[in-house]
Amino acid sequence: CKLFGEVDDCTCKIDSLESLNNLQVYPRLDSLLARNFFRYVKVNLMKECPFWADDSKCAMKNCAVKTCTAEQLPYGLKNADGECNKYAKEAQPESPRTAPPGEKDEDCSEPRGDLGYLNTTISKESEEAFKDWTKYDDAQETFCELDDDTSPNMQYVDLLLNPERYTGYKGESPHRIWNSIYKENCFKPAEQSGYNSQSLTEKSLEDLCLEKRVFYRMISGLHASINIHLSHQYLFPASTCYGIETWGPNNDEFQSRFDHEKTDGRGPQWLKNLYFTYLVELRALEKAAPYLEQEDYFTGDDEEDVSLKKGIKDLLRVIKEFPNHFDESRLFRGNKKEAKALKQEFREHFRNISRIMDCVGCDKCKLWGKIQVQGMGTALKILFSGDGMGPQSTVSAGSKRKFQLRRTEIVSLFNAFGRLSSSIHAVEEFRRRLS
Ligand code: FAD
């Protein structure tokens, strides 16, 4: 699985990307994602599949998701996943580590609708303008359908207790998901009908414009990342010797999915697409760095929050120093009308993919699928929502608005990037094991 040359559609050498990730990004990110701010997410795993009768049965024991109650969360993340953290902070100037038993955070208990944004700069006076912006944002700029934060089906999940790994989810259900993502939602060469992912080779990709190649590569990169994780955290059945199940890397599983010969040469291409997706999210983090450096990352524990902020600054420093970022300015250029229509199409296809995640028939896979697609959508929102991050950000002609990210978007962006980073790290490990 040694890959050579440059990542397709980028000017970045694979070697330099691997050393950036494995030596600098992965160790930093791995420790940041274990911190309270990133490990707890609020998610709706019960949303109905909008496309076909839901076959989500979760009969397999490894598909079960362990949820937690609001009481188990750090103080600052209680109620709405901390999206109202500004208000929680105001109500609790001393930021106790845990709230007294039974205490209800009144400010956060109301359905907050538009105010569910993690924004440190919003004042009461700007609330009206903010609501307008949120509407605009939801209609125009987001690439994902986010879960409705006020739904009674939202649950808290500790990601560390629910790692992405082999679940045994296979067969018709995941094939239907992957097929519909590729077939219905990826752009295909005009002359190609009856498309399936198998037929999309590098050769046929050449017929697509850059934007459509980017789209396909991002989906394929996500697919590769998921399949690397299930091969790397594989469940070995109880052996007659030890009598217990064990988790660990499965060389055969990895080879059957990515080996050049076993995949008719497509496996290495899929790995390259993983690297491509990584570069897109890396660039989004670089672009959003001024914004992300200003966030509070509030969990209710002052010491923890200060130290996490420091860790994030350090990670962003490493990312900013990397010279070969994905160049999003090459996309949606040329004829303005056509570029606008293409961008709209791109966004709609991506939003559709986020909705397909509600059809995944294994809760654990659905959890990580939703987080990763949302993280990718957040990266796209960052890359294509104007040129600046912060107060000067111009998002549409004539209207200057502040760029906003919700807590859930920030958490999913870092976690999604963390998944890609850990996949690239795992590729290195498989390379060593197979050499
Ligand atoms: P699949 O991975 O199902 O692929 C189907 C076909 O797509 C392949 O035959 C190949 O032609 C093509 N293909 C494969 N990889 C790529 C690629 N990278 N780019 C383009 N084309 C490709 N299983 C788990 O054990 N744990 C999980 O956490 C998990 N999460 C999942 C999340 C989602 C959203 C989905 C849809 C599935 C998930 N799965 C998970 C299932 C897993 O991805 C596979 O679908 C399953 O293991 C069956 O694999 P397969 O060999 O049949 O090929």
Image (tube, rainbow, N blue to C red):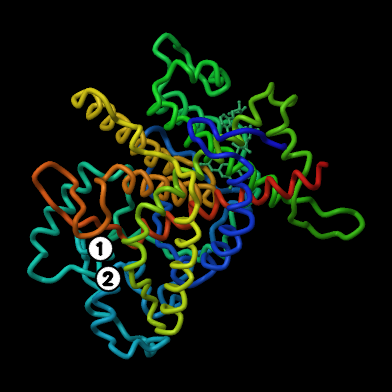
| Residue at screen point 49% across, 32% down | 217
Q: Amino acid at mark 1?
A: Gly
Whether label 2 lies within 8 Å of ligand 1 gets the answer no
Q: Which residue is mark 1?
A: 116
The quarter of the rendering in which ligand 1 is drawn is top right
The residue sitting at the top extreme is: 191
Instruction: Please determine whether, in this image, residue 291 is positioned above or below residue 353.
Output: below
Instruction: Please determine whether, in this image, residue 207 is positioned above or below residue 315.
Output: above
Residue sitting nearer the eye, 94 or 1: 1
Whether label 1 lies within 8 Å of ligand 1 gets the answer no
| Residue at screen point 19% across, 56% down | 392
Q: Amino acid at mark 2?
A: Cys
Instruction: Please determine whether, in this image, residue 96 is positioned above or below residue 61.
Output: below
x, y (%) of residue 240?
90, 54
Q: Within 10 angstroms of label 1, few (less than 14), some, or many (20 or more) residues?
A: many
Q: Secondary structure at mark 1?
A: helix
| Image quadrant where residue 28 sits | bottom right
Where's the N terminus, which quadrant? top right
Q: Is residue 407 left or right of residue 113?
A: right
| Residue at screen point 69% across, 34% down | 257
x, y (%) of residue 398?
8, 45
Give me the C-alpha separation between circle 2 and circle 1. 6 Å
x, y (%) of residue 320?
44, 56
Tag 2–tag 1 contact (CB < 8 Å) = yes
Q: Secondary structure at mark 2?
A: loop
Q: Is residue 275 left or right of residue 155?
A: right
Q: Which mark is residue 75?
A: none
Q: Which mark is residue 84?
A: 2
